[in-house]
Amino acid sequence: MMRRLAPFALIAGLPMAALANPWSFDDPVDVTAATGERVFHHLESAGRRNIAVAGDAVGVAWEDDRDGTPRVYLARKDIAAGAFGDEVRVSGEGEAFEPTLVALDARRFALAWEEDGRVRARVIEGARLGPLFTVDRDEAVQASLATADGRLLLLAAERDGRFPRIVLHELQVDDDLNLRPVSRCPVDKAAPVDEQLYPAAAVQAGHLVVSWEDRRPGHTIIMAATSRLDAVCTFSPAERISWRDRKGGDGSGPMRSMPYGKGHGVSRVALAAYGEASVFAVWADKRNFREGYDIWGAPWSVATGFGENERVQDDFGGVAQQWHPSVAGHPDGTVVVAWDDERDGNPSVVMSWREDGAWSDDVVLPGAGGPGDQAHPSVVLDAAGNLHAAWVEREETGGPTRLRYAFGRVAE
């Protein structure tokens, strides 16, 4: 299906119904009342998973420095409620960064983050804050989470000799919200020859799919490996999934037709399961080097593995830079990607979704455009297919921030 081309100013100004948006959005609300001249909020998790839905509750996890030290917080609200309730500080006394959040089940959330150079995690059920779990490794950072059958699957970049390496920790959760280690293994069987960073994970059809940034060819590429959930430490050989033209059977070969250097840059992969047997991987990609990063991705299926790369943004997006993609999927086959986009002169949160086998025209997330900076989105679809989005807002570049949330109910 060929995409329509339209000036971005017109896209931003059109009502969503005119663009056949699958969701009808309420006005955005603040996630937290903690704001001020010296307060800065961050949604920076590996895999860009800062929002989750557990049953009838939506949660948002972030880091801010309201008391002079960066700490991790969680705020929740009922989906039907108009505002978030009281938030809870999740991290300890140290400097804490990059929280990641998942729904463990219909009642509980699980969080992981970096604090004082180590990865921590805990489970929250209602007002109960579970005991703190610490990964027993020094220099562990960039946590990412997935869940399967009541288990918590925690990934982190852990120092292995000279380089960080992506490692999986399988954790069991008991009735007292304790996290207990079950198994630990590197995702890539081959010892790292350069940095492995920013893992992302998704569970689908009895499989765990893990992807990450990898610098083994001398520039950054996106790699991935999969395992069965009944044997999570038996990963397939790692393969390269960010391509311009496929070359090099082991995934480490050079790229054809590159204008300079060893290859184009890529950044910060995110994963989401959709349909009955598919996962979509999305990342920021600099293959169109003249305009900086664009949004690209690749589908995975149980039957065929990873497919060819797809450009997610529309043609008009080529005139500006895009950053920070997040992706959400649903069992009905819906998959949506959101990112921040500078084509309107300042960052706005823009999204695209699959329709009729192709990516839709790009549209501004309602309430996340216009004056100021709107950036770092994180999105999730609930069981009914409603879209939940959180992002960071600034009135001016470099200024203090607010943390915003919007609810998009499935359009009738």
Image (cartoon, rainbow, N blue to C red):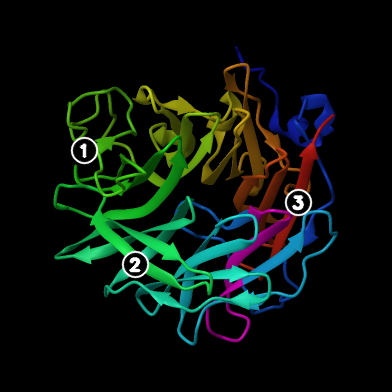
Magenta residues?
53-73
Side of 310 where 229 appears, left or right: left
Which residue is depicted at the point 60% across and 28% down? 333
Whole-percent x, y for residue 250 in the image: 17, 31
How far apart are labels 2 and 3 at the CA level? 36 Å
Q: Quadrant of the N terminus?
A: top right
**Which residue bears the numbered disc 3?**
406
Whole-percent x, y for residue 194 in the image: 19, 53
Q: Secondary structure at mark 3?
A: strand
**Which residue bears the numbered disc 1?**
237
Which residue is depicted at the point 58% across and 79% down? 65
Q: Amino acid at mark 2?
A: Pro
Side of 300 where 1 appears, left or right: right
Labelled pair 2, 1 in contact (Cβ < 8 Å) = no
Q: Nearer the viewer, residue 399 or 68?
A: 68
Q: Nearer the viewer, mark 1 or mark 3?
A: 1
Side of 100 where 362 appears, left or right: right
Q: Secondary structure at mark 2?
A: strand
Whole-percent x, y for residue 359 in the image: 59, 24
